[in-house]
Amino acid sequence: MSPISPLNEIWQNYQLATDCFKITRRTLVKGDVGLLSNTGFAAASLEDADRIIVKGRNEWDDFVILSLWAVFERLIIDFVREKAKILLDQHPRQFTEKLHGLVDGQIEFWKIGDKLDLFKGVVDVELIGQAKQIKYYRDWIVHKSKIPAANVTPIQAYNVLHRIVTTISAL
């Protein structure tokens, strides 16, 4: 599986669910509620259904951003781990093995900003900055603390993270 595949899978599932929200809304507007039997929409008024759909769509957008970020961060960690293996071929072995072990064991705990900064000069710094904004937005979704400077949409998150992964996959 290519490193980009997990991001693409999330994006395809996002598009599928978005289409389902649209179809459900159209079905309700047409009053063809027979198709919605045994769902939470069967007995809902159009107003209530609209509210539920809008809320669900917004929460789905946030969930997709969380999913994209989780996969992206794992891809970054795996990339650094793979590149750090070159240390095992260097001398003096006693030192380089310990250095490799340190990088391999601690990469999970590095701040994501530090991990992303490793790619400056290889990945467009503007993309790195946008990825950090996505991380800030992701933190807001999870913690609902500091209001993010910018709203991030799933398509923005996907495009930025996909471009970064595509760039580093070619290295």
Image (cartoon, rainbow, N blue to C red):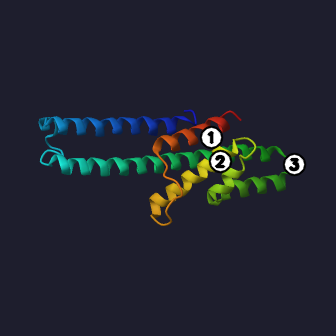
Q: Which residue is mark 3?
A: 91
Inter-mark Cα distance, 1 to 2: 8 Å
Secondary element at tag 3:
loop
Residue plotted at (48% across, 40% down): 155
Q: Which residue is mark 2?
A: 128
Residue 106: where, in percent of width, then height? Answer: 67, 59
Residue 27: where, in percent of width, then height? Answer: 19, 35
Quadrant placement of the C terminus: top right
Q: Is residue 146 left or right of residue 95?
A: left
Judged by depth in the image, the label closer to the viewer, 2 or 3, is 2
- Find out whether the residues at labels 1 and 2 contact each other: C-beta distance under 8 Å: yes
Of the two numbered discs 1 and 2 on the same chain, state the one appearing first in sequence: 2
Neighbor class of circle 2 (other Cα within 10 Å; few <14, some 14-19, many 20+) is many
Residue plotted at (45% across, 58% down): 141
Vertical comparison of 90 with 22: above or below: below
Residue placed most toward the observer, 124 or 102? 124
Give residue 14's quadrant in the image: top left
Secondary element at tag 2:
helix
Q: Which residue is mark 1?
A: 164
- Residue lying at the far bottom in this picture: please name it: 145
Residue 128: where, in percent of width, then height? Answer: 65, 47
Secondary element at tag 1:
helix
Q: Amino acid at mark 2?
A: Ile
Q: Amino acid at mark 3?
A: His
